[in-house]
Amino acid sequence: MAGDAQTSLAELRAAAGGCRACELWRTGTRTVFGEGAERAGVMMVGEQPGDREDIEGRPFVGPAGRVLDEALERSGIERDLVYVTNVVKHFKWRPRGKRRIHQKPNLEEVRACRPWLDAELALVRPRVLVCLGSTAAQALLGRDFRVTRERGRFVESPLADRVTATVHPSSILRAGDGDARRAAMEQLVADLRVVARELGTGG
């Protein structure tokens, strides 16, 4: 799988569709694999698909995805340059009435999904890797990594030429009133402008 140089993203996606490495396949509608160009300049890694992603089978198409799209546009990063994926490929949730409420994946679930993410990294070989939120950052950069302390800065890692982290776009949606949400969005855009400058697409 991850070590086969001839494997394409399409083949990898098809193989991941049958993954039973943890129990989340029992409650998720489908595997939600990454999406984007096979040689994207940037890979952005979130925690897991949400309700809308689980339904549509595509990453970052729900409310958090719309926040990310706005932040990318404002920071000067072309969406076509970005490959988006998640540390965990199935939606973990608990019922609340008729709604499905997000639950954070545990360490076992993150580890079970890691071979798929490693394979994506090996195929895409992004110039810049961006971890979105603490689950992705700690899965890829170590459990002691703190997004609040390191966000918007490049850190040493063998995973890509340049590696950084910022908040998950869903945190903007939870930021409270209008002023707090706008401030949180400005911080996210500022973090992504660091990436844009590295790519030569931002001011």
Image: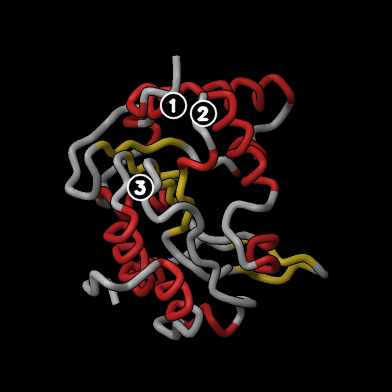
Q: Residues within 10 Å of mark 1 (few under 14, many from 20)?
A: many
Q: Is residue 92 above or below residue 82?
A: below
The disc, 3 or 1, on the residue closer to the chain's N-terminal end is: 3
Tell me the residue at 43%/51% (across/down). Answer: 45
The disc, 2 or 3, on the residue closer to the chain's N-terminal end is: 3
For label 3, the SS is helix
Q: CA distance from mark 2 to mark 1?
A: 5 Å
Q: Are marks 2 and 1 in contact (CB under 8 Å)?
A: yes
Asked whether 100 or 123 is in front, the reply is 123
Tell me the residue at 81%/69% (across/down). Answer: 97
Amino acid type, residue under disc 3 in the picture: Ala
Whole-percent x, y for residue 147 in the image = 38, 37
Residue 191 is labelled as: 1
- Which residue is under mark 2? 188
Q: Are marks 3 and 1 in contact (CB under 8 Å)?
A: no
Q: Which residue in the rendered view is the most extreme toward the right?
A: 98
Q: Which residue in the rendered view is the most extreme toward the top?
A: 203
Q: Is residue 203 above or below residue 109?
A: above
Whole-percent x, y for residue 34 in the image = 48, 60
Whole-percent x, y for residue 155 in the image = 23, 35
Asked whether 173 or 119 is in front, the reply is 119
Picture mark count = 3
Tell me the residue at 31%/66% (across/down). Answer: 119
Residue 132 is labelled as: none
Residue 137 is labelled as: 3
Q: Residues within 10 Å of mark 2 (few under 14, many from 20)?
A: many
Tell me the residue at 33%/69% (across/down). Answer: 111
When asked about the image quadrant of residue 98, the answer is bottom right
Amino acid type, residue under disc 2 in the picture: Leu
Q: CA distance from mark 2 to mark 3?
A: 15 Å
Q: Is residue 193 above or below residue 117?
A: above
Whole-percent x, y for residue 13 in the image = 46, 72
